[in-house]
Image (cartoon, helix red, strand yellow):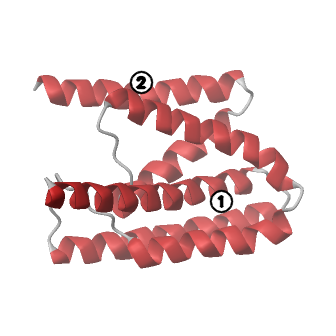
Amino acid sequence: YVSGLKLIFSEVFNFLFILILGGLCSHLLDSILFLFIFCSVRGFSGGFHAKKHWICRATMIGTFLLILCAKHAAMLAWPLILPSIGGISLLIICRFSPIEHPNKYLSEEKKQKNRIRAIGISIVYLTISGVCLFLGRGEGMTVLLSLTSVAVLMLVGKRVNEKNRIEMNIA
C-alpha cells in the first residue's frame, strides 16, 4: 500500500506542479493540454519509465518546459514543422506502440488494443493540432509538441529496455 500511495502522491505532485508552473508562466491552457494529451496517449503507447520517482518528475516537468520553450520558436515556422514533426511522431507511434515495461506484461490482445488506441488518439490530436494552427491558435503547437514528446519518450523507453535486456543477458 505504501508504494501505491507514493506513486499516487508523485503523480498528483507532477500534475499540480505543471499546472502551477503553467499558470505562473501565463500558459495554464498549455499545461492542461500537455497533461491531457501526454497522459492519454502515453497510457496506450508506453515509453520511458524512470526507476525513481524524482527522475519521473524531472522528466515530465522538463518535457513540459521544453514544449513551452519550443512552442514560441516553432510557431514562426509551423507550416513547415507540422507535416514533418507530426508525420515522424505518428510513424514512431505506429511502428513501436506499445512499448512494454519489463514489469508489466501485456497479452497480444492488449498490445493490439493499445496500439490501435494510441494510433487513433494520435491521429485525432494531429488533426486538432492542424486545425488549431490553421486558425492561428498557438494551442495547436502545444498539442503537436506534446504528441511529439510521447513519441520521443517511446524511443527512449525502447532503448532503455533494450539496454536492460542486454545487461541482464550478460550478468
Q: How many circles with numbers are drawn on the protein?
A: 2
- Neighbours of disc 1 within 10 Å: few (<14), some (14-19), many (20+): many
The image shows residue 18 at horizontal and vertical percentages of: 55, 30
Q: Residue at x 17, y 58 (%)?
A: 170
Camera-side residue: 42 or 136?
Answer: 42
Q: CA distance from mark 2 to mark 1?
A: 24 Å
Displayed quadrant of residue 43: bottom left
Camera-side residue: 39 or 165?
Answer: 165
Which quadrant of the rendered structure holds the N terminus? top left
Q: Is residue 87 left or right of residue 99?
A: right
The image shows residue 37 at horizontal and vertical percentages of: 52, 53
Q: Residue at x 73, y 26 (%)?
A: 25
Determine the secondary structure under disc 2.
helix
Q: Which residue is mark 1?
A: 144
Q: Relative to 60, say whether 147 is above or below.
A: below
User: Residue 120 shows which numbered tag?
Assistant: none
- Residue 127 visible in the snapshot: no
**Identity, as a three-letter code, of the amino acid under mark 1:** Leu
Q: Which residue is mark 2?
A: 13
Camera-side residue: 31 or 97?
Answer: 97
The image shows residue 34 at horizontal and vertical percentages of: 57, 45
Q: Is residue 28 left or right of residue 7?
A: right
Q: Residue at x 26, y 62 (%)?
A: 100
Q: Is residue 109 left or right of residue 90?
A: left
Tell me whether the residue at label 2 lies in contact with that at label 1, contact meaning CB atoms closer than 8 angstroms: no
- Residue 63 visible in the snapshot: yes
Determine the secondary structure under disc 1.
helix
